[in-house]
Image (cartoon, rainbow, N blue to C red):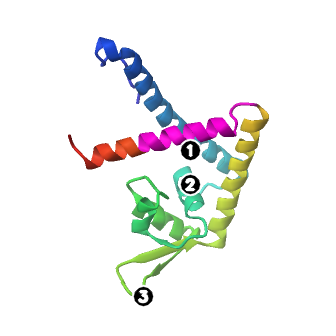
Amino acid sequence: MTLHTNLAPAPQQGFMGSYLEMLSLVERLHRLLLDVIKDEFERVGILEINAVQALLLFNIGENEVTAGELKSRGYYQGSNVSYNLKKLVDTGYMHHQRCAIDRRSVRVRLTQKGRDVRQLIARLFARHADGLQDKGVVGLDGLDEIAHTLKRLERYWGEQIRYIY
């Protein structure tokens, strides 16, 4: 998706252009992150799961959660969580178990195979963090500022979904 800046009124063209550029960067960075994970998987010979599923494993970590909790806790942002969970269970990366109290609810947790992938992703991210610092790409203060700004943007967009004015 390419965003165009010619949709803004003349007085806001500068801000609107910057906003659209930021939106495009967020989208490209997410896709690039998935490509980086895919490349790492190809390098080590993991071909049965994809980068989205690997991020799901990374985000769940040592927690045991229901499918519904995946979104509310921020572990998964996609729309096809059932497909990805089934694939991860079928390929042995996750255990699933019906909740004893509510038989409709299924709890999931990582298997050893899933924890191994999580560690692979953790090592990949650690290499990236070291490289960002070593090459002077961004320091701790810069990352903190980026995270703070993105959280404010997330909060603003969340409010736009909940409240119409």
Asked whether disc 1 touches disc 2, contact meaning CB atoms under 8 Å apart, the reply is yes
Q: Residue 46: where, in percent of width, then height?
A: 65, 56
Disc 2 and disc 3 in contact, CB within 8 angstroms = no
Q: Earlier in the sequence, mark 1 or mark 3?
A: 1
| Residue 13 picture quarter | top left
List the residue tagged with mark 2: 55
Mark 2 or mark 1, which is nearer the start of the sequence? 1
> Residue at point 36% right, 84% down?
103
- How many numbered circles are shown? 3
Tell me, for residue 100, which label it has, or none. Answer: 3
Find residue 5 and report its image quarter. Answer: top left
Q: Which span is picked out in magenta?
A: 136-154
The type of residue carrying mark 2 is Leu
Q: Amino acid at mark 1?
A: Leu
Asked if one can make out residue 32 in the rendered structure from this viewpoint, the answer is no
Q: Residue at x 34, y 17 (%)?
A: 12
Q: Could you say whether the residue bearing mark 2 is in a helix, strand or loop?
A: helix
Q: Which mark is residue 34?
A: 1
At x 41% / y 26%, what residue is drawn? 20
